[in-house]
Image: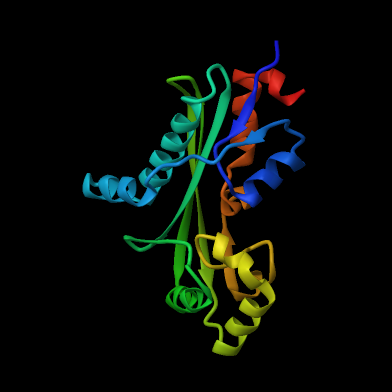
Amino acid sequence: MSVMLILASKSNTRKALLQQAGLAFTAEPASIDERALEIAAIDAGGDGRDVALLLAQRKAAAVAFAYPGAIIIGADQTLSLGTELLHKPADRAAAVVQLDRLRGKTHRLHAAVTLVRDDLMLWSDVQTAELTMRDFSDAERDEVLAREGDAILEAVGGYRLEGPSIRLFETVIGDYFTILGLPLLPLLAALRDIAPETLT
């Protein structure tokens, strides 16, 4: 018996990762108030990892309500600079400000993924990567932004490690898929255990 697999996300990167892994799925973005949930989690003593997991779970749960019996993949990513969480830049000017804040510093990307069926959380995982940016020049920053175009507006850090933004980095420690926003290997392992038919 086939099981419907749904990605609760509008992220082009996450969709591409699942497609490249050969999964048959549909994408259905979830409608949740991410900032309100983030504030509530932080007020309750949570950190970037907690926020990423909460958002992934809430996204999956919201979509699961509309698709009984389907397996929903929820995913989210947060960026921690010390104790502060940064978000996707609204425009190029905001990306400049954000990259300047990250310049010469180490930050962490937390990527969470969860599987939900109906009202049951089947599985969840959170992975963290540590990234250090070079003390790049303004000219280097502007060149990268020009090459990236609007694509960086979809990235929580205002950069894309899979694009020209890699020039701005000194070191990267962590799983590549985690950095892209979807811990793919743990997800595939979970699907093999929970719903192997989704991988055929």
Q: Quadrant of residue 153?
A: bottom right
Q: Could you tell whether 177 is left or right of 114 in the image?
A: right
Q: How is the image coloured?
A: rainbow
Q: Tell me what residue is drawn at x 46 percent, y 39 percent.
A: 56
Q: Is residue 82 above or below residue 9?
A: below
Q: Tell me what residue is drawn at x 68 percent, y 71 percent.
A: 164
**195 or 88, nearer to the observer:** 88
Q: Tell me what residue is drawn at x 63 percent, y 19 percent.
A: 195
Q: Quadrant of the N terminus?
A: top right
Q: Tell me what residue is drawn at x 57 percent, y 49 percent.
A: 178
Q: Quadrant of residue 139?
A: bottom right
Q: x and y percent of residue 108 in the render?
A: 46, 58
Q: x and y percent of residue 142 in the render?
A: 60, 84
Q: x and y percent of residue 35 in the render?
A: 35, 52
Q: Quadrant of the C terminus?
A: top right
- Is any atom of residue 73 visible in this view? yes
**171 or 62, nearer to the observer:** 62
Q: Is residue 89 above or below residue 10?
A: below
Q: Is residue 81 above or below residue 93?
A: above
